[in-house]
């Protein structure tokens, strides 16, 4: 295994039809059917005012306070992606804010799940 950053190609993604069907399901049911392997737990809270979101996950592992790979993920995102960031729950440095959010929206990203800090919270709340 090499040291440093790695970006893996996405060889397979869920079809739009499958994503649309998942969007109809309660999150708890999806989590239960996956043996809770990917449930994040109760520390993650929604920062938006709309309902749920569904899309193909584009995953990022980030060091606390380091958003370089999050920038790379937004650059690689395609319409319909949900960017999922594991920053270990660190809350001392924000990983993204208004400018990155605006760029992600322009790219067609439908949402974020971030286990870490964000800034410009009002912009996230205004965006559905």
Image (cartoon, helix red, strand yellow):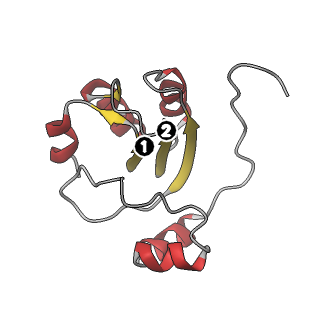
Q: Is residue 50 left or right of residue 42?
A: left
Which image quadrant is residue 123 in? Answer: top left
Q: Is residue 26 left or right of residue 18?
A: left
Question: Residue at coordinates 41% horizontally, 43% vertically from top-left?
Answer: 114
**Are the residues at dot 1 and dot 2 in contact (C-beta closer than 8 Å)?**
yes
First reached walking from the N terminus: tag 1 or tag 2 = 2
Question: Residue at coordinates 47% horizontally, 57% vertically from top-left?
Answer: 40
- Rounded to the nearest angstrom, the CA distance separating label 1 from label 2 is 6 Å
The local secondary structure at tag 2 comes to loop
As displayed, is residue 94 above or below residue 121?
Answer: above
The label shown at residue 14 is none
Question: Residue at coordinates 68% horizontally, 31% vertically from top-left?
Answer: 7
Discs 1/2, front: 2
Q: What residue would you read off at disc 1? A: 115
Given residues 92 and 32, the one toward you in this image is 92
Q: What residue would you read off at disc 2? A: 88
């Amino acid at each position: 295994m090499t040291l440093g950053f790695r970006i893996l190609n996405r060889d397979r993604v869920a079809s739009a039809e499958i994503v649309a069907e998942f969007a109809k399901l309660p999150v708890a049911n999806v989590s239960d059917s996956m043996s809770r392997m990917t449930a994040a737990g109760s520390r993650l809270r929604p920062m938006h005012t709309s309902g749920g979101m569904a899309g193909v996950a584009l995953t990022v592992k980030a060091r606390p306070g380091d958003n370089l790979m999050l920038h790379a993920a937004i650059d690689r995102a395609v319409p319909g992606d949900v960017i999922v960031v594991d920053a270990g729950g660190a809350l001392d440095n924000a990983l993204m804010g208004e400018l990155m959010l605006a760029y992600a929206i322009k790219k067609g990203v439908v949402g974020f799940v971030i286990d870490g800090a964000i800034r410009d919270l009002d912009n996230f709340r205004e965006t559905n």
